[in-house]
Image (spheres, rainbow, N blue to C red):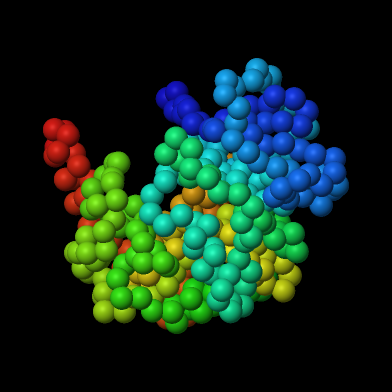
Amino acid sequence: MAERTYKNEFPIEEIDDNSWITGQVLISRHASKPDGPWWDDGKDAFFTISEAPNPKPSTRPLSESCPIVELSCGPTTARAGIFEVGHAYLTIDLNIGTPEHVTLGKLAEMDLSFKVPKVYYHGVHCDRYYLVCSSFPSGRNLLYAWTETDDHDTRSLWVSQIADACLELSKFRGSAITAIDGGILNDHLLLKEVGSAGDIDYEPEKMRENCLEIGLDCSELTLAFNSIQPIAFTVNNDGLVGISSWRHAGFVPKDWIGTKVRSNDLLESADVCNKLWTEEDLAHWSYYIGVAMKENGFREFWYDFAKWNSKKAQRHMKRIGKA
């Protein structure tokens, strides 16, 4: 069988040794600190980001010295952009719900035991939301760290502290299924229909109806970063350093936190994990994080979600005339 191909919607295009375009933004590398917002790579290089020029300048094939690491590298993330650029991450996603920089601003006001990113840039171009936020140089992204050790105690420490962070956030309560500021919560797994959706499909009451239909207890809505996936975490020998992915954060039924992990513990990490991890790595991650969440009191209803999700797919097939 021929391998399925996909088109990456946001390829990296190189202009010269120090300039790259992806989507509607230009990333520039500097030898000294530039004016305006910038970030570094810890190796005496500095980066800035701005709206790409129009018309677009001519480009050339990527050189080996390109400092941008593409993490959106497969069918799951083909319509998004996830890049590591020095000590920062650039993400490009649909412009739905409360923007992530608003969430990060709220989190910065909270006294948390782990670090949250600093925002360097945010903007909306052609209905896509662009965000650059800091990484955590004092640690290593779990995407890489997980495969660099097979020590049981180290892996257990990491997932235990991730589950602890979930428990810490769950102490904050909400009155509706919303983002942290009361706006639209961007969580497509809780949508009733398959495919494109508008803001009306994310309305709190609709989300609540869907959760009840799944069988989740909606009497207790708690804060969750709602994105338990390897690429979201930075760790070191002491444990969890920080959490970098907050686009799906908001108030959800507490039972959804454990259920979402059990139903999909890779999310936007799926493509790069499938590229860099072995089947054993994937299985161990799923097992370790599942045990840690359960030990912290997070229940999971993955079977109920799977049944509901199957009905959702059937409704979609019927609607498009393929049932």
Residue 156 in view of the camera: no
Q: Quadrant of the C terminus?
A: top left
Which residue is outermost to the front? 35
Which one is in front, 138 or 276? 138
Residue shown at the point (13%, 33%) measured from the top left: 321
- Count the marks: 0
Q: Is residue 312 left or right of residue 179?
A: left
Q: Is residue 69 left or right of residue 311?
A: right
Apparent side of residue 178 relative to residue 74 in the rendered image (left or right) = left
Residue sitting at 46 percent across and 29 percent down? 6
Q: What residue is rendered at 42% in x and 44% in y? A: 94
Q: Position of residue 32 (x, y in %)?
A: 85, 44
Residue 208 visible: yes
Q: Quadrant of residue 105?
A: bottom right
Residue 189, quarter of picture: bottom left
Residue 81: horizontal and vertical position, in percent?
A: 53, 40
Q: Position of residue 203 (x, y in %)?
A: 26, 59
In the picture, which quadrant includes the N terminus?
top left
Is residue 224 shown above or below 307?
A: below
Residue 16, image x, y percentages: 75, 25
Residue in the foreground of this view, choosing between 250 and 267: 250
Residue at screen point 49% across, 49% down: 268
Above or below, 155 against 126 in this view is: below
